[in-house]
Amino acid sequence: MSASTEPARPRRSRSGRVVRGFAGLAAFLLAFEVLGRAGLVSRDYLPPASTILLRAARQLGEVHFLTSVAATIEAWAVGLLIATVVGVPLGLLLGSVPGVNVAAGAVVEFLRPIPSVALIPLAGLLLGSGLQMKATMIVYAALWPVLFNTIYGLADTDPVAKDTLRSFGFGRLAILWRVDLPSAAPFIATGVRLASAVALILAISVEMLNGMGTGLGMYISEARTGTGSAVTVLACTFWAGVIGLALNALFVAIDRRVFAWHRARTGATT
Amino acid sequence: MTTATADRTARTAGAAAVRKARAPLSRFLLRWAVFVCGVAVWQVAASGAENAFFPPPSKIIVSLRDLWFSGPAAHLWLSDKAFADLLPSLGRMLLGLAIAAVIGIIGGLALGRSQRVHEYLDPLMQFFRAIPPPTLIAVFIVIFKIGTEMEVATIVFGTVWPILVNTTDGARAVDPLHLDTARVFRFSRTRVLFRVIIPDSLPKVFAGLRLSLSLSLILMVFSELVGSDNGIGYQMTNAQGAFDMTTLWAVIVMLGILGYVLNALLLIVERTMLGWHRWANRLGE
């Protein structure tokens, strides 16, 4: 709407933003390159940016690297899917039945402070190092964001809408389905997006600690001990960042498309 | 005049806190009751099943006491081993978090107040933030070798982003009315920073700190699991190698206690520092 009133200014400032963003990136890469070539730090430890990016590009043709990434993504997808399928109904239950809420709050309060990675050694002994173990750890860690956002979303439901349906004789489940769930959906989507980042972290952590099996974490652990290790490890870090960004962008895009009505209603800009 | 007002504010806020605390007391008791019941069920089930992987809580508590809480009362019952295991871990964690907080808060205030700097650095920050911290451990092991520097560097790099991003958000969202008021009163730039911008950003800063606190605990354990020669994570690696399930569980419980206590401490600091904030907002309504 504002595009018709002042079309030039926003567009110019937006392209300026993109240019400045690229300038920042270029400056960083240049500084990295100069630092790497100047010999202040040993090249074995901190290779120049061009060497790392070249190595990263070459990794795309490496079968072992690609299968490792695929294994990590597989564990991420399976874990996130289970966490969502379990977390959303559980959140709906906890958020809508007061008695259950308080009781489960206790369990949640005492389980949540346990750092997820602390369970990896135990899970490793119990479940080995396969997809089952990775998925279990991912589900444990990724469940929390989904669960909490579902509960927050339920608390945010418009009470008038619920009362309206109630006065028309709708039952509790019908109200949950027609009012609570749609109104909590944007919050749930945010929870799943956060859980996705957690799931990726856990997948790589588990693979690094296991010392067996396949995955990006395992690939990094192997590269660490090999020759020219810094270049390969930094190239993997680059790809890990790209994967993290891509997954986040995917969820943001879905969010924008599906929940445009929500942003329109609340006037949120992001 | 200011002391009198502050005093009254504190007293009113205190009264409100008492009133607020009384209602959740039954909730608090109920939660602990559920927790105790849960542990009791676990005890009965585990003693019945006699599965080596799931020792009963009674055994875990004994192991926990033998490991770390068998010292003299003068040392808060902490044993020498507790000092040897817990202190290095906690020290590294808090050092890493402190460095991350300084960088994150100063950087966030600067980025939040300067749109231009923010535009230059935003894509770079988004990328660094998207890197899963465990991959960085490998980078830092290559650079620093295994040891304290590697662990602190990992914690700093992993925990700085939530603080930085949240502080930036907070500093960007400073109420323009407050800034205008400060301008009318001809506040100096430093005074604006300390009296307007920082107080307005604090709630967001604490939101970031809370996220980073739990992240720092995770990264502390993870970096010690990957490579260290002392600390809680090292204890865990040993127990795993020896198939000592009871110790493994004891370490997990200890980490849960640490996470709980640290989070509670941060909440207390936050409430003390932000008491005025809630009060001021209520006045505004």
Image (spheres, coloured by chain):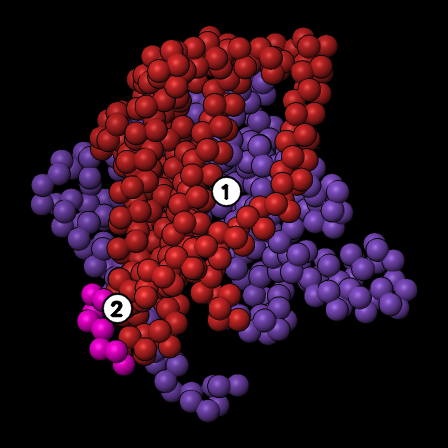
- Chain with purple colouring: A
Q: Which residues are magenta?
A: B184-191
Q: Nearer the viewer, mark 1 or mark 2?
A: 2
Residue pointed to by mark 2: B192
Residue at the image point whose x is 48% and y is 66% from the top: B281
Q: Residue at x 84, y 58 (%)?
A: A174
Q: In the image, what residue type sits under mark 2?
A: Val
Q: Could you say where residue B87 lies in the image, as x and y percent from the top left?
A: 32, 23
Whether residue A234 is in magenta: the answer is no
Same chain under badges 1 and 2? The reply is no
Q: Residue at x 55, y 14 (%)?
A: B60
Residue A96 in sight in this render: yes
Q: Disc 1 marks which amino acid? A: Val
Q: Is residue B110 above or below residue B25?
A: below
Q: Residue furthest right?
A: A169
Q: Chain of mark 1?
A: A
Q: Answer few, some or many: residues within 10 Å of disc 1's Cα (few below 14, many 20 plus, some between 14 and 19).
A: many
Rendered hue of chain B is red
